[in-house]
Amino acid sequence: MKLCIILGTRPEIIKMSPIIKYCESKKLDYFIIHTGQHYSFNMDKIFFDELKLPQPKYNMEVKETTHGKQTGSMMIKIEPILMKEKPDMVLVEGDTNSVLAGALTANKLNIKVGHVEAGLRSYDLTMPEELNRKLTDHISDYLFAPTECAKKNLLKEGISEKKIFVTGNTIVDALYQNIKIAEKKVNVLERLKLKQRNYIVLTLHRQENVDKYNRIKNILDGIKKVSEHYNTPVIWPIHPRTVKVLKEFNLTMPKLVKTINPIDYLEFLQLEEKASLIMTDSGGLQEESCILKIPCVTLRDNTERPETLEVGSNTIVGVKPSSIFNGVKNMFRKKTDWKNPFGDGKSAEKIVKIIQSNLKEN
């Protein structure tokens, strides 16, 4: 069996890292294509080293541009690699342009496609991610659904049950592995002069929040209410692009919000683990907070992680200041004794074993 792993963003690297490590430990025949969708290779080289991963065999310098241009240029660069390497399967994870480009290219070359984290649905087709994940699911041969809920989504869309495998989510494997590394390597609370369980972590990156004046202003007003009521610092690792947008909108930061430059993954993981609460518009952080037993308030109108709502680790509040404040108040009252719905930390092993046994049969 020869396996090709295609990834392009940091969340994909994190969620694919347990699969890569398992392939390494079993000395399997595999290689990595990195599309370079979001970050410079110099930054990602450090990131691979930090997570103790082998460097990709192929690095593609795909610049951030329109969705169509980016996806198309990825396909153009991926195709000759797959034709040369002739893998038995291409494995993609999540919902980015890299995922769709990898799955489409492999499919057109009659190479089997495996989709890790299949079946997630927000039912909001204005989100590029929703289009990417739906299209990828429908052209994949193996759909590795993290939960029974994700499996039901796939069955509702007419996808054959024979293609679907409920494996848990590799984010659980990644968190368990990387928290241990973080404990030995970093002390972000000391560096930022923070006390455990005495601060809130904030992340915002979605275009529908950051690029719209009314939404970002409402979010900042809501955060101001929260921070002043609880007299609690809010730590925001902020992207330079968001800083630029806030300046263009002439919006000022609430007093207790401390913006910091984006930090490395191990530091951020430790920052999450020791927070009192997380406020975010990220899908991945909804999962991570659930696994880490940190209450989460999601600054969106929907979620593709309904399992977090079902177990009570997360609440969806939209962007109205009063809704944000009430959501935080409710989550602070909650006991953090919910059950993690995303698996036992052995998802990578399950996924690779399913691939091995099925490819042997075929």
Image (tube, rainbow, N blue to C red):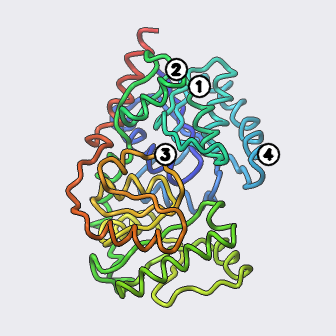
Q: Which mark is residue 159?
A: 2
CA distance for labels 3 and 4: 26 Å
Q: How many residues crowd around disc 1 within 10 Å: few (fewer than 14), some, or many (20 or more)?
A: some
Residue at 41% over, 45% down:
306
CA distance for labels 3 and 2: 18 Å
Q: Earlier in the sequence, mark 4 or mark 1?
A: 4
As helix, strand or loop, the secondary structure at mark 4 comes to helix
- Between 198 and 310, which is closer to the camera in this rendering? 310
Residue 199 is left or right of residue 203, and the answer is: left
Observer-side mark, 4 or 1, equals 1
As helix, strand or loop, the secondary structure at mark 2 comes to loop
The amino acid at mark 3 is Glu
As helix, strand or loop, the secondary structure at mark 3 comes to loop
Residue matched to label 1:
138
CA distance for labels 1 and 3: 17 Å
Observer-side mark, 3 or 4, equals 3
Q: Are marks 2 and 4 in contact (CB under 8 Å)?
A: no
Observer-side mark, 1 or 3, equals 3
Residue matched to label 4:
69
Q: Earlier in the sequence, mark 3 or mark 2?
A: 2
Tag count: 4
Q: Are marks 2 and 1 in contact (CB under 8 Å)?
A: yes
The amino acid at mark 1 is His
Q: Earlier in the sequence, mark 3 or mark 4?
A: 4
Observer-side mark, 2 or 4, equals 2
- Between 82 and 96, which is closer to the camera in this rendering? 96
Residue at 76% over, 35% down:
76
Residue at 32% over, 67% down:
330
Q: Position of residue 204 (x, y in %)?
A: 55, 66
Residue matched to label 3:
304
The amino acid at mark 2 is Ile
